[in-house]
Image (tube, coloured by chain):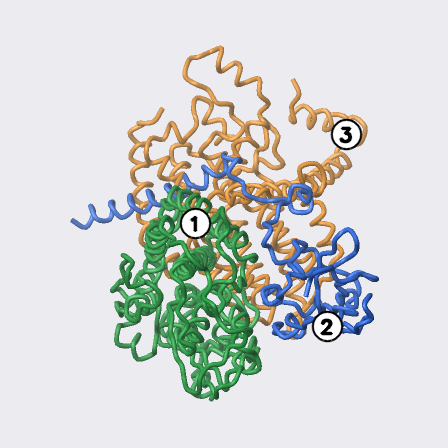
Chain colours: A green, B blue, C orange
Amino acid sequence: MVEALGSTQEGNLIINVGPQHPATHGVLHLVITLNGETIVHVEPHLGYIHRSIEKMCESLTYRQFIYVTSRMDYLSSHINNHACALTVEKGMQIEVPARAQVIRILMDELTRIASHELWWGAMAMDLGAFTPFFHAFRERESINDIMEETCGARLTMNYIVPGGVMQDIHPNFQNRVKAFLKMYKSKIHEYDEMVTGNIIFQNRMKNIGVLSAEDAISYGCTGPTARGSGVSSDIRKIYPYEIYNQLDFDEVLEHGGDSFSRYMVRIREMQESIKIIEQLIDHIPEGDFQAKTKAVLKLPKGEFYTRVETARGELGVYIVSEGGTTPYRIKFRSPGFSNLSVLNHIARGSKLGDLVAMMGTLDLVIPDIDR
Amino acid sequence: MFLKDYINDVYGAVKSLLVGMRRTGYYFTHHKEIITQQYPDNRATLDLPERFKGEVVMPHDANNEHRCTGCTACELACPNGTIKVITKFEVNAEGKKKKAIDKLVYHLELCTMCNLCVVACPSDAIKMAQTFEHSVYDRSEFTKVLNNPGSKIMEGVE
Amino acid sequence: MWSLQKIANTIHEWLNTTFNSTIATTIEMVIAGVAVITLFALLGLVLVLMERRIAAWMQIRLGPNRVGPQGLLQSMADTIKLLVKEGLTPNGADKFLFNLAPFIAMIVAMLLMAPIAFAKDFQLWDLNIGVLYISSVSSIMVISILMAGWSSNNKYSLMGAMRSGAQIVSYELSAGLAILTIIVPIGSLQFSEIVQSQVNGWWIFKGHIPAIIAFVIFMIAVTAETNRAPFDLAEAESELTAGFHTEYSGMKFALFFLSEYVNVFIVCAVGATLFLGGWMPFHIGHWESFNHMMDYIPSSVWFFGKTFALIFLIMWFRWTFPRLRIDQLLNLEWKYLLPISMFNLLLMTALAILGWYF
């Protein structure tokens, strides 16, 4: 294996980036073979934060297992919960009330913005600009405040239950979301001024880590990583769930395939999420926020699969049921794992500093990769 | 024109840098934009939303009565085994034996604040409190008994 | 009027009347050494606090505000913390070089203090090649960084050190050329003469566009030379954890930290002397009353004011810009700064020959 890494070649240097390293945003371990500053090979090592969430889910009932999935991709925990609830609803054939559907979508999009905000700040910090990180947190915190008021928690909300949402939205919810939209729009030009338009930033990002559309497909990339290469992969458009097919929003596509395209996809995706929220915030239908469900949920015997678009890409939830109260087997198809697999391909031949930028644009959340 | 491009490059680069510096300069001079909350100092004004999930508590009224019937719905709903309901049999005024809780043991160290027990409770006996400063010196202090000593079930709660 | 010069003269006279000249000179040297060390420590405390405050305000935070009034004692507390921390030496390290490197960094920073004119006629050593001395001594700094990086027996440190080597060596060129652009019309490398030549206006005003270009290039080059963001590739926190001082802890780390800040102070002092007139007050043409008012402000205040303005600028850079990549860093130097400053030097030489400056 050592030979495969190219260490036997004279002058090559192997360094371990991580598990504790400021650039890996978690406990990712990269074994990097360097030739001077140039990367010869990158080998990600996983498993440092493996908590066997899939196995844990097998011993939990269909109501209980949803909260565990918040701990996978903690930045889009709400969307993870949504995916699980959708799978259970699909199996049970529960009709979700219109109000619950709209609330779920609103929360999903708020989560997406919050996740992209954190990514934006961390991305700039990877490139050495510390200030944007704190500015990103200003917007993210106001989303968290909204979440806290309605769901009761800031990060692992556990707001979605099979059949709807746990509680009705808080009476302040609509006003606060509108206030957030207003605040967000007044700050959006700062993103351009501080990071996107900056000449140093652009030079660091453009034509770096180029991922062709073919490679994006063959590595199984999804989400903004794939859309940055021009691969249409937005589950909200391709396999619409809830009422996404009735909404007016665009799938963001950039065709460069480089780090800057992936960056721009996320920046523009935030605008699309804003668009969705604006369409729905004044039109939350009246009615129940939760469908009437049995006290004990039992999925019929069979296999169920749903997918949703998280902030990082396609999350698939696969449940094998034996007809009992707990799943026989659960498998999560996490977006981060496939997106990480592309790292060696795009990083080879570039400089060490670019590797950090590329990891930033892949938007890795390590608990999502390891589960 | 090579030279013209070169000068344009330099001009555009310098301009983009100055735009960024203007933005940070703006925040440097506008201190009212500061968003820091000085947490331990602002305890008095700290205002948590009523839905905030801090820990599970059991409200008691003035007569030291709670609404828990000991049905163990919360225990069954909990994904982590956080709640243990220990029941006993009480003899009521008519001489009938009736099931009631002896202790409702709550392990805060296991709790993930998922709110499933509160949702599951048929008699609204437990709810989420807005406390969040949970750190203690001894781990055993995390194991709490939610019902007050000597407390009884409220009249009319079945 | 209170001035540093008078204090210095009083001490000098008193020593010379009390002792014979040899002892007097020795005592003066000791005083100067103590003064430099004190200034060193003070600068460390003040600049660290200043940087943290600037960073906090730009990042819409409050910054240190717990220790002492308004957090003014924060850097003092940090110093105490660093002093009592254990200074580890890694097992495989070259122990001698590892422990020597921070001291070289500090000695270099101290040596650089010598020719700087802090106030009117207040200077440790007014040697006739002052600017040359500064640029030659400051290049020793790279040796300490290379030493630290190599002896740490850490791959991150080594990479940081090698980056730093390439960076400092190339940016010294354009810093030197920018200095030279101003030296050409002055015709002297002596600090006192450089300041004296600006009695009728600072060079940034007198020298037309070449001086402004030289000033910009100088600021960029010295930011790179002192390893500060956006050129902090030697440290590159998100890439190399802490670069060449990854393995240092306690006071040995503090010496690197301190020497970085003192270096920033010195390059800004040189910049202030060359371009902004050093301790020379701000004068406008023939506005006698205005000029007279300006003269009332002590020269040391002028000097430190200008220097700290430049330091603020460098800190402003740091908290705004992302970091460059190593090849971009060298491209910037060799493809942009160096040709521009060479052309600029030619322009200034032409101006100097024709006498087209004020």
Q: Residue at x 39, y 79 (%)?
A: A305
The answer to whether tags 2 and 3 share a subunit is no
Dividing the picture into quarters, in which one does residue A265 lie?
A: bottom left
Residue located beneath label 3 in the image: C15
Judging depth in this view, the residue of C311 and A283 nearest the camera is A283
Distance in Å between CA atoms under marks 2 and 1: 58 Å
| SS class, disc 3 | helix
Cα gap from disc 3 to disc 1, whole angstroms: 51 Å
Residue located 82% across and 65% down the image: B93
**Residue at mark 1:** C321
The three-letter amino acid code for the residue at tag 2 is Val
The reply to whether the C-beta atoms of the residues labelled 2 and 1 are less than 8 Å apart is no
Residue pushed farthest front?
Answer: B94
Other-residue count near label 3 (Cα within 10 Å), few / some / many at <14 / 14–19 / ≥20 = some
Q: Secondary structure at mark 1?
A: loop
Q: Position of residue C228 (x, y in %)?
A: 50, 51
Chain that bears disc 2: B
Residue B91: image location, x then y, percent: 82, 70
Query: Residue pushed farthest top?
Result: C289
Mark 2 and mark 3: span between their CA atoms?
Answer: 88 Å
Task: Please state which of the two labelled residues, at mark 2 or mark 1, is closer to the viewer.
Answer: 2
